[in-house]
Image (cartoon, helix red, strand yellow):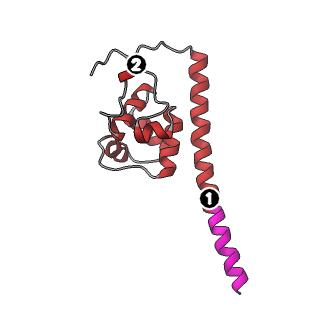
Amino acid sequence: MTTDTTDSWFDPDVTTFGDRVAGARERAGMSQEDLARRLGVKLKTIKAWENDLAEPRANKLSMMSGLLNVSLLWLLSGEGEGPDAPGTGELSSDITGMLTEIRDIRAQLALSTDRLGRLEKTLRARLREQAGE
């Protein structure tokens, strides 16, 4: 496999989920500690994901794709929009800032969506309890 073309960058036939997480995290300029903190998980959890010893829950996977600026499909299968290959050019600071803000908003949105789901589930349960009284 050649490594000097963008076609072979994170080839889905040879990379694992953990490889893609580690590669996208590194391209995003984050340490394992940074990603763990931003996802609200322990460092050992990130290490387990990157070593293919465990897989994240759907809400963490969604947050991670936003933080790393890659598609969910790419994280899971290697197909779709992944990180830019090395050497594709540096981005200006204003574009980098906007991308960071987008990642943060996506992560917040994923957390809010998860919270909304829990609240709706609790509300339905309480309404059923109240109707049964």
Q: Residue at x 49, y 40 (%)?
A: 72
Mark 1 or 2: the one toward you: 2
Q: Mark 1 falls on what kind of element?
A: helix
Furthest residue toward left: 1
Q: Amino acid at mark 1?
A: Gly
Q: Residue at x 63, y 68 (%)?
A: 122
Residue ID for mark 2: 6
Q: CA distance from mark 1 to mark 2?
A: 39 Å
- The relative height of residue 128 versus residue 3 in the rendered view (above or below) is below
- The relative height of residue 101 versus residue 130 in the rendered view (above or below) is above
> What is the x, y in percent for residue 75?
43, 38
> What is the x, y in percent for residue 54?
34, 50
Residue 30 placement, left or right of 110: left
Residue ID for mark 1: 117
Residue 111: say if magenta: no
- The relative height of residue 53 versus residue 85 in the rendered view (above or below) is below
Residue 107 placement, left or right of 40: right
Residue in the foreground of this view, choosing between 40 and 65 = 65
Quick one: quadrant of the C terminus? bottom right
For marks 1 and 2, the one nearer the N-term is 2
Q: Main secondary structure of the magenta part?
A: helix
Magenta range: 119-133
Residue in the foreground of this view, choosing between 88 and 6 = 6
Residue 119 placement, left or right of 36: right
Quick one: quadrant of the N terminus? top left
Disc 1 vs disc 2: Cβ atoms closer than 8 Å? no
In this view of the protein, can residue 38 be seen by the observer?
Answer: no
Crowding at mark 2 (Cα within 10 Å: few <14, some 14-19, many 20+):
some
